[in-house]
Image (cartoon, grey):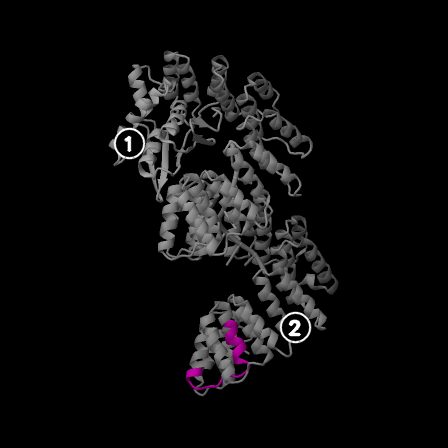
Amino acid sequence: MYVTCGEVELARLIFDQNHVKSVFLWNSMIRYYSWNGPFDEGIDMYYKMIDLGIRPNKFTFPFVLKACSGLKALEEGREIHGHVKEVGLDSDVYVCTALIDLYAKCGCLTEARELFDKMTKRDVVAWNAMIAGSSLHGVYVDTIELVLEMQGMGISPNSSTFVAVLPAVGQAIKLNQGRIIHGYCVRRGFDNDGLVATSLLDMYGKCECLRYSCIIFGNMGVRNEITWSAMIGAYVQCGHMGEALMVFDRMCAGDNVNMTPPTLGSVLRACAKLTDVSRGRRLHGYLIKSGFMLDIMIENSLLAMYSKCGILEDAIRLFDEMKLKDSVSYSAIISGCVQNGNAEEALVIYREMLVSRVVPDMATMVGILPACAHLAALEHGRSNHCYLTIRGYALDTSVGNALIDMYSKCGQVDSSRKIFDRMPRRDIITWNTMIAGYGLHGRGREALLLFNDLRNEGLGIDCVTFISLLFACSHSGLVCEGKHWFAEMTQEYNIVPRMEHYICMVDLLGRGGFLNEACNFIGKMPLKPDLRVWGALLGACRIHKNLKLGEEVSKKIQMLGPEGSGNFVLLSNMYSAAGRWNEAANVRVVQMEKGFKKSPGCSWIEICGSIHAFIGGDQSHPQSQLIYEKLEGYLVEMKKLGYQADVGFALQDVEQEEKERSLLYHSEKLAIVFGILNKSSNKPIFVTKNLRICGDCHSAIKFITTITNRAITVRDASRFHHFSDGTCNCGDFW
DNA sequence: ATAGGGTTAG
């Protein structure tokens, strides 16, 4: 009676006072703990009972197994399964059901299924346990089949059946199936059950059918913390972050509702998406005070919140303080580093992860590949590709997308295409990434061909597709095609052009030499052109040496406020190229006065898995002396072939020879020569630069390919340059 | 019944 009424202390008192305890007395206590926790207390009692030589009966096992299932204590569960066999209870329906539940919850679905198939008589609870297990593992088809099979055998589903099925329906985003179930629940009156209603609410949320979630939530008379949490989760899932926070506030304003980790996890996700750091920090404080920080899910959510809000230092601090780290923690911090522009740190942390023996999963790998892509670390990328293949992840769509991107950014766009062709399922990101890859390499024709294939696929073509396509056209001089698809985009695909599309168009027209048309185009834009639009035009002015327009554009840029993307350098270079040194210098002075810093030019190369970086005039590398000697040697030979230093890029108004020298030490030249010195003579050289390649380097590298008879590839801030036999595939329009 | 990390363009 005391156990049933929840008076566990009184029950325990009576239990402890009885010196001779029957199995019934033990069962009562174990039952209490297995239903209310603490679960380990229930398991402890079971073992005490065994030690005292008391034989468990068919009631004991379901209770203790439920405790094991609650703790996901698979090892104990297996041992108790052994006891079940010893006492010959393995065909009891209740015991069997408890075993199925245990195995399913511990991830051993096959074992659960074996037990289930061996059962001669199955009641609705047994079916529900199997259905819940299958649903938990997200095997949607099997789950639905089980329900149908159950009905075929004349067993009618009860409300628990639907509570068990609905998560699988939501996860598989099977809205129609969910509606059918909803209808069935209404007919049988199950929808008045709070658990069923919450499951339905959640299912609709996962199917992005927020309206229904809201209706169900509004109709619910009694709401507990799980209902609130499901509603908040539904808003977050559907991208309505502000409303999610409002519901959270309503929940906090009311009483009788507890905070739970899932609620807080969803709220943190909303803060991250809204980049609402101040709210995130307030929550962090609350979490510390309320002891929620012991939950690794909560810590991971905080990590992600800080890194998505761009505060990598706080994310790293939190990460370092975490006592327990799982693969999610590592994935979150690795992606955080990459998203905040620190790909090297991402690789360092990935290494730490391997040392700590935390096994990387798919999300980790999808996070580490962009780090390799960013650094153009092909060898790291390849080794991760191997790992993915070994683990059987390589055919996953997101993994494939990340691989395509990595290979194309590492200069191997043909490898990207191989991955693309072998992928069993492609989504729009797959196509966009591949199109962008071709664009990056100046292979616009192939990008257009691929786009044609995409049009026959029936996939939802999105605004990113057109950004990639227009970019590809502009870097391959395909002006007509670009104009055509820009028009089609608005007319046929009903995509409202965003700033990015306008940037691509200005770039396309300007780069193609249609500077007036580009100006007119800007004039007709419905959006206020931003700095990047003017930057694209300025770039075109430099290519086509239109200093007058360049000056005007530059004024516009300066009026728009601070910028760090090198537009000052562009203008200054244009003046220098025209021999107007004073004005060139003046631009630099203005730049400095206004406090705009251009990030220093930096180039790097990966050799045997290590990355060697150089800045202009760098002498810190151990091989520096050798590099400079080699460069001097090349200079002599280059001059014999007709090379003239393009001193317009040297900036300072100094003596000719001095200028030549300063150009010679540009970071990309240093990295290339280092590569030549350290890679065998038949290997191509691949260098990456953080800014756009310098014009003098661009022509010097052509000569170097002739002298050394090597293919040299440079990835700069905007595209790839493939040099060989004295030419570059960009057609000198970079 | 509710819950954390991932891929494209700029």
In the rendered image, the vertical position of residue B8 relative to residue A154, given as above or below: above
Residue A5 lies left or right of residue A628; in this view the side is: right
Residue under mark 1: which chain is it in? Answer: A
Numbered badge on residue A124 = 2
Residue A241: quarter of image: top right
Give the CA distance from mark 1 to mark 2: 78 Å
Indicate the position of residue A369 as horizontal and vertical percent values.
45, 45
Q: Nearer the viewer, residue B3 or A453?
A: A453
* x and y, in percent, of residue A72 in the image: 48, 67
Please indicate whether residue A81 sits to the left or right of residue A188 in the image: left
Residue visible at 62% across and 67% down? Answer: A131
**What residue lies at 57% left-to-right and 29% top-to-bottom?**
A473
- The image quadrant of residue A591 is top left
Secondary structure of the residue carrying numbered label 1: helix
What residue is shown at x 26% (from left), y 32% (from top)?
A: A626
Q: Earlier in the sequence, mark 1 or mark 2?
A: 2
Vertical position of residue A367 compared to residue A640: above or below:
below
Front residue of this view, candidates A282 and A9: A282
* Residue type (three-letter) at the residue carrying disc 2: Val
Q: Residues within 10 Å of mark 2 (few under 14, many from 20)?
A: some
Q: Which amino acid type corresponds to the residue marked 1 in the rendered image?
A: Ile
**Residue with the most extreme bottom position:** A20
- Tag of residue A523: none
Where's residue A106, x and y in %? 50, 67
Residue A7 visible in the shown view = no
Q: Secondary structure at mark 2?
A: helix
Q: Which residues are magenta?
A: A50-67
Observer-side mark, 1 or 2, equals 1
Give a yes or no on whether discs 1 and 2 share a subunit.
yes
Which dot marks residue A627?
Answer: 1
